[in-house]
Image: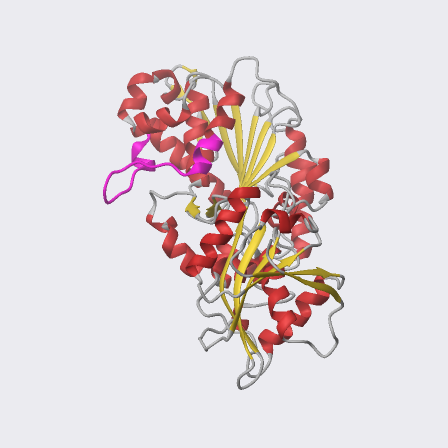
């Protein structure tokens, strides 16, 4: 009843580091294993709601786990009797079956412990008929069928049985060979031909975004709370795995710290790039961003007589609430007004913990001489939380729409010379900016924008109600 242990015992050559032999798991792997186990338990309910989509960075092992390890585990213990796997092409689908077949034919330990699984089904004396290019029927009755998604699949049956498990892996081609018109046809195949093979089958769809507006991009949008009709109508639960995870206290961790590809420092250094956004974050919007692009960020340093610690706060720390964003922004008027964001982070802290964190940031940036708090959420409650601060507090209430403020801020980044320069790369902030306005978060944009736009007035003055208060 443990697919992870099954993988370690029988399939370690697929999950170990080829250089060191070490076996490590990503956080996503344990989540996948928990779901696979729920489907395997005796009496597990078979309903149309057992449909899950996993959108994950490249090289996280989606195909290894969902198209080899879990099918072998299901087959070995007869948790599944008929698995149908689909991919973008027949060749791609058959590669999954080839890997599956290779283990049955050549894995000595698997053959020793599961002899019925590993032998082919015989229909007559000396006539093994359970193996073909896109099909394997095992001695214990398990069937694995692999096809390209556009192959004829309606009415797929084996001995009157329909698939109890449907796997869909990278069912879209690369962007150079794909269009929105082709996406519509591929989506129709999925919803009108593949899913109706069995309305009670367990369904897994895995993929990485190949194109803005693609099927997998629809899944990402759905995971971010957007209404995507076909995702809702087909009852898919979407799991969008990010490579860098937020600890909620200002620190981060890797989704797979044991894998060099997901080494945290390396990812943090790359995550402001478009390549990282598309292939690791599954965010093609950052490639054709409506607002910021990677070329809008410049880096440098200059003396700043004044420095804001700007806070864009959330009222609660519930999972459904926003983060509290904290930014340190230096400003100068020599030789002209400019702003220098030095630090930006988001946290899910409140009360005494948040106050302690703010004090730590001030201690790390001793040049801070003013705290700027947006009070659109929480109002003057922030003054109670941030009592006895070592610098004065200014509150600001924004009445200008968020997109308009973002456009004004962007204009300062794009001016010649740029009026906003980052002292160092600020990956979290820059990621939010490249994803705006469709990203999950925009709190850091607000925190930086409040400080910058307070100092550098655009041609059209921002309408804001501002009051100055001494710390309590």
Q: Which quadrant is home to the N terminus?
A: top left
Q: Residue, x 45% and y 53% (percent of image)?
A: 360
Q: Nearer the viewer, residue 325 or 382?
A: 382
Q: Is residue 163 magenta?
A: no
Locate residue 189, reporting x and y percent.
Answer: 66, 42
Locate residue 223, reporting x and y percent.
Answer: 62, 43
Q: On the image, which quarter does residue 332 sit in?
A: bottom right
Q: Residue, x 49% and y 75% (percent of image)?
A: 304
Locate residue 48, reporting x and y percent.
Answer: 66, 27
Q: Is residue 456 left or right of residue 169?
A: right
Q: Which residues are magenta?
A: 11-32
Q: How many marks?
A: 0
Locate residue 383, reporting x and y percent.
Answer: 63, 51
Q: Nearer the viewer, residue 201 or 396?
A: 396
Q: Is residue 225 left or right of residue 323?
A: right
Q: Is residue 17 left or right of residue 280?
A: left
Can residue 454 be seen in the rendering of this structure? yes
Q: Residue, x 33% and y 37% (percent of image)?
A: 24
């Amino acid at each position: 009843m443990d697919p992870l242990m099954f993988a370690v015992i029988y399939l370690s050559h697929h999950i170990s580091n080829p250089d060191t032999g070490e076996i490590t798991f990503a956080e996503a792997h344990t989540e996948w294993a928990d779901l696979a186990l729920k489907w395997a338990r005796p009496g597990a309910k078979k309903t149309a709601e057992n449909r899950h989509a996993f959108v994950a960075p490249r090289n996280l092992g989606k195909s290894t786990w969902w198209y080899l390890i879990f099918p072998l585990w299901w087959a070995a213990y007869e948790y599944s009797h008929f698995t149908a796997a689909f991919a973008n092409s027949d060749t791609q689908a058959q590669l999954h079956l080839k890997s599956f077949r290779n283990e049955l034919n050549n894995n000595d330990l698997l053959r020793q412990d599961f002899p019925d699984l590993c032998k082919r089904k015989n229909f007559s004396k000396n006539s093994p008929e359970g193996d073909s290019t896109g099909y394997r029927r095992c001695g214990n009755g398990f069937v694995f069928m692999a096809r390209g998604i556009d192959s004829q699949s309606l009415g797929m049956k084996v001995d009157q049985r329909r698939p109890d498990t449907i796997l869909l892996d990278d069912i879209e081609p690369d962007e150079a060979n794909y269009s929105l018109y082709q996406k519509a046809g591929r989506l129709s195949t999925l919803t009108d031909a593949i899913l109706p093979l069995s309305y009670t089958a367990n369904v897994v769809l895995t993929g990485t975004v190949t194109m803005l507006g693609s099927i997998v991009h629809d899944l990402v949008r759905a995971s971010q709370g957007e209404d995507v009709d076909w995702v809702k109508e087909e009852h898919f639960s979407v799991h969008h795995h990010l490579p860098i995870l937020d600890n909620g206290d200002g620190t981060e961790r890797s989704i797979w710290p044991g894998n060099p590809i997901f080494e945290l420092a390396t990812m943090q250094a790359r995550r402001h790039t478009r390549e990282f956004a598309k292939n690791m974050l599954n965010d093609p919007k950052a490639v054709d961003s409506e607002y910021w692009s990677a070329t809008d960020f410049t880096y440098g340093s200059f003396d700043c007589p004044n420095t804001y610690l700007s806070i864009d706060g959330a009222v609660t720390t519930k999972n459904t609430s926003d983060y509290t964003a904290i930014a340190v922004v230096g400003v100068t008027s020599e030789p002209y007004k400019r702003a220098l964001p030095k630090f930006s982070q988001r946290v899910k802290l409140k009360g005494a913990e948040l106050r302690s964190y703010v004090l730590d940031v001030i201690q790390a940036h001793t040049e801070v001489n003013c705290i700027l708090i947006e009070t659109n959420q929480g109002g003057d409650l922030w003054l109670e939380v941030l009592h006895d601060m070592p610098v004065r507090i200014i509150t600001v209430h924004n009445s200008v729409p968020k997109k308009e403020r973002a456009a004004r801020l962007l204009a300062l980044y794009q001016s010649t010379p740029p009026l906003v320069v980052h002292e160092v790369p600020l990956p979290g902030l820059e990621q939010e900016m490249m994803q705006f306005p469709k990203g999950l978060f925009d709190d850091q944009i607000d925190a930086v924008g409040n400080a910058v736009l307070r100092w550098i007035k655009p041609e059209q003055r921002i309408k804001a109600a501002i009051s100055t208060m001494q710390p309590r």
